[in-house]
Image (tube, rainbow, N blue to C red):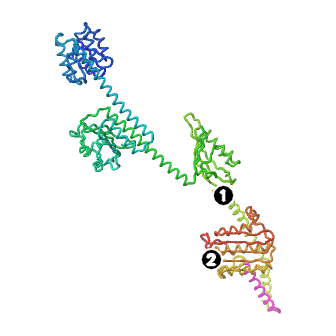
Amino acid sequence: MATILIVDDHAHNREYLTSLLTHRGYGLLEAVDGEEALALVRAERPTLVITDVLMPRMDGFEFVRRLRADPLVSRTPVIFYTAEYQRPEAHHLSRAGGVVHHLAKPAEPEEILRVVEDVLGMATDEVVAAPTEEFERGHLRLLTDKLAVQVSRLEAANRRQSAVAKLGQLALSRTDSETLMHETVSLVSQTLEVEFCHVLEVLPNDEDFLLRADVGWNAALLHQARFKQGTASECGYTLLRREPVSIENIRTERRFMISPLLQVHGVTSGVTVVIPGMERPFGVLGAYTAKLRLFDRDESDFLEAIASVLAADIERRRAEESLRRTEERVRLAVTGAGMGTWHVDWRTSETLWSDVCYRMFGLGPGTAIDQETFHAAVHPDDRPLVNAAIRRAVIERADYDVEYRILWPDATEHWVAARGACYFDENDQPLRMEGVVLDITQHKRTERTLEENAGRLQELTRRFIELQEAERRHLARELHDEIGQVLTALKINLQKASTGGPGAAGRLDESVTLLDRTLQQVRGMALDLRPSLLDNLGLVAALEWYVGRHAERTGLVGRLVADPPEIHTDPAIEIACFRVTQEALTNVARHARASRFTVELTQHDSGLLLVVRDDGVGFNPDAAERAAGHGASLGVAGMRERVELVGGQITFVSEPGCGTEVQVEFPMVSKLQKSPIS
């Protein structure tokens, strides 16, 4: 049985022939190029050689020339099996070199077997011819043509690679989107040598495309054109397939409808590719020509590479825009919350602050800032606290969470709360710390005020309980010592008068006198507890009664000035005004050593103004306020609490030796929802 040598640099081609011929019982040898084949022919002397033409190191023509030049193997028949060199001149040249037959790849199995059997059935003299001079010239010409084709292909590949690189550089240089897309269609048109090119963006309605950039199209026709998705256009079909679509001839195309724009421009051939996206494709890139042309795989790969550059730029822009919007939302949220942001790079010691952060530390934006400057701004007593929080964040990876005081350049003290975290590299070395800072000065002041008020309230409560108990003792003493004694005397008088003896009438008269005095005492006690005049006749009448009674009790000269004479306002305001007057006049009697006092009450549009003035020894209001804060001056504290409770303001104007003036501003309506219990 004959032995056949298969020569081809592609393994799948060799496998196809060997499996086919082995099945027919032929012996098989294999070689990957002409050089290896020539050595096998000389060593194994096969009956027939089937060889490719285009191979590395030594092609098929050179193999035949050397084979025919070797007398020992020159008569070995050769069949060319190739996809190249199918033109008549190539067949003529191969016959001139002694090739007995020419098979075109890919050939049907029956044809291959028939040709092999025919060649093996020929006499040696019929199939072998020595290479002629014409063969030598033709071989050289074919090699030259082959080299020219390869050079042309390399030049085209270089142009395509240069175009992709140029577009990539433009994208990296942050060229704006419109300019980049117009540069894209221009590069594609020049590189592929086509007349028309466009970039279409997929619209959200999933029905149409939006033209983003074009070259070669008639502007007037382009303005009227609609680009449809789906099979209504070549671009819509490309989007459905998600792969390159080549159009060899639009007149014979049946897979989809051709856009009218292509038809009116006389387009014959084209190629389209998808511009991909992260979530959905961005659109389609298309290149077209009026010439009949089949775009090869290299050209569609080039178009896909261009589309990938566009897609990367589009996604980068989308990501940057998303990041910008996120940062803007965060900035607005941080700014709206009154927070400043800060960043410390541990490698470079660079410190960055936002404008809000600068304002929070009493510094102008852009002031040179570093860690040393920051620590100098921290209150000396709080620096250990801040340093400990930083160490915990860096060493223990705990959250940076600390409240501390800072000193402004004008030496004023402020409070801030800082929150943040430390970030580390792949070697667990600290990279940076960043976070936010919030001015909590007002919060701390409010907190301190609440603590002070709580202390004052506690002290006032204690004092009020003491006063209540003292008042109860006073009432009990009055009831026991005064009224109790009178009632006992009345009882004795009435018992004696009931016998009707001498003096009974006198005893009854004495009893009536005792009852009158008792009634006066009870009425006075009731007025001290709650003056009924306030409820029945109003604030001015109640103050007038009290001023007169106080002057009578103390021996001081007192007077009331009211403008207007009748004043009616919120009951809570009236009782507060009356009680403050009581407390102020009590202080005059106890401490002022005065001879005169005046109470002035004026009503205006925004409320009431109460002024209690005396000509006494005066006092230091600041010292009294401090004492009130520590619970030592409860008269002052009590008046302030009562006034502020209804939304008013109280001011003490005095100095030692110059008398005292208590000024109280009351609103027209109390801030209390219901009148306080007095």
Residue 626 image point, x, y percent: 74, 62
Residue 359 image point, x, y percent: 61, 52
Q: Residues within 10 Å of mark 1 (few under 14, many from 20)?
A: few
Q: Is residue 25 visible?
A: no
Would residue 428 appear left or right of 122 to someone viewing this image? Answer: right
Name the residue furthest right.
502
Q: Residues within 10 Å of mark 2 (few under 14, many from 20)?
A: some
Q: Main secondary structure of the magenta part?
A: helix
Q: Quadrant of the C terminus?
A: bottom right
* Above or below for 587 versus 377: below
The residue wearing badge 1 is 445
The residue wearing badge 2 is 569
- The magenta segment is 501-525
Helix, strand or loop under label 2: loop
Query: Magenta segment: does it hold 493?
Result: no
Q: Nearer the viewer, residue 162 or 330?
A: 162
